[in-house]
Amino acid sequence: MKKFVAIGILVLIAVTFVGALYYLYQKSEEDPVVYQTEEPSEQTIIKKTVATGKIVPKEEVLIKPNISGIIDEIYIEAGDKIKQGDLIAKIRVIPNVSSLQSAKDNVATARINLDNEKKVYQRQKELYDKGVISANDYDAAEVSYQRSEQNYRSAQQNYEIVRTGTTSGIGSAANTLIRSTVEGMVLDVPVKTGNQVIESNNFNDGTTIATLADVNEMIFEGKVDESEVGKIKEDLPLEVTVGAIENKSFDAVLDYIAPKGVEENGAIQFEIKGTLNKADTTFIRAGLSANASIILAKATNVLAIKEALVQFDDETKKPYVEIMTGDQEFERREIELGVSDGINVEVTEGLKMGDKIKVWNQLKAPANIAQN
């Protein structure tokens, strides 16, 4: 029995020995693992976040009438450049029947009062000339007659205003002619000849006849997500790209961040505004969609490597890379990182130009190397 046990142990040892030899032989036949290397480079790294929005004028002026009526003529069209005081449109007043009749009755009443005061004044003048009444009585009659004349003229003017919208003697206050209040470009003319318009007053915004703006002062107006709003601040530089204008970007400055967010599609969005550089004379149409890259940090001409080359210590969490010291021999070197754009990262300490950094992806040696 002991003899069989001894034989079994010897066989097991022999099989194990042969298996080890075969495993070592297979390993010797495999291609060696080769690590590639990369060197640092000099780059400009920009850390940014992107906001979507559109280009709009900094200020838009809505031209509204101060009298209701029907558009009789329009003298401008969208795209025209006009100056302050230029004629925009002419309104034909359609009088209210009740107001017209009331104004007409006021004219008739004022005429009756005037005729009566004229007769009184003439009688008082005759008595004054004969020395029957005092100068005070005569002056009172004269003042009353003059007041009646003024009331009659006012009633006539009011009747003309109700009937036509204007009257003689009021100069630039005539309101049937609508003029521009500012200098700029006409962006929109939402009314046409024959359209009825409503005057602007305390109870009604009125009908917009034209929209004007200075197209030399444009801004980017967009929104950023709540996850990004904490990273930005006013006066940061923007790079604005307009979809309709290829191969060109516009410099701008972030000058407004909304203090309150608005929920859109389940996410909180914050409005931002940035003023475009006035030095750029490229014509940008109002309302064009645009994207703005908000520059959070920028490092110009610095030593940089790909972020994929950086490793982090499991315990200290400090970054490090492995530098080649010989043929497929590497040593660990801790580094200090700076600005990152998500692809490349600035290295402030630990590396110099020409260092060969280990690429962590393991590659098998080419076939010709293995055969040699």
Image (cartoon, rainbow, N blue to C red):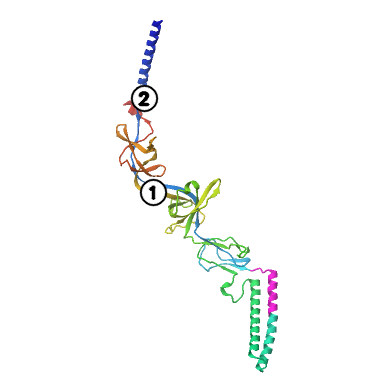
Dot 2 crowding, Cα within 10 Å, few <14, some 14–19, many 20+: few
Q: In the figure, residue 139 lies in which quadrant? A: bottom right
Identified by mark 2, the residue type is Glu
Answer with left or right where residue 208 lies relative to residue 3.
Answer: right
Number of labelled discs?
2
Q: Earlier in the sequence, mark 1 or mark 2?
A: 2
Residue type at numbered disc 1: Lys
Answer yes or no: is residue 299 visible: yes
The residue most toward the left is 326
Quarter of the figure that contains the C terminus: top left
- For the N terminus, the quadrant is top left
Separation of marks 1 and 2 at Cα, in angstroms: 47 Å
Q: Nearer the viewer, residue 295 or 129?
A: 129
Q: In the visual, does 116 lie left or right of 339?
A: right
Which residue appears at 65% of the width and 88% of the height?
A: 137
Whole-percent x and y of residue 74?
Answer: 58, 65
Q: Quadrant of residue 3?
A: top left
Magenta region, residue range: 93-110
Which residue position is annotated with label 2?
30
**Mark 1 highlights which residue?**
298
Q: Residue at x 48, y 56 (%)?
A: 219
Mark nearer the viewer, 1 or 2 = 1
Say left or right for 141 vs 311: right
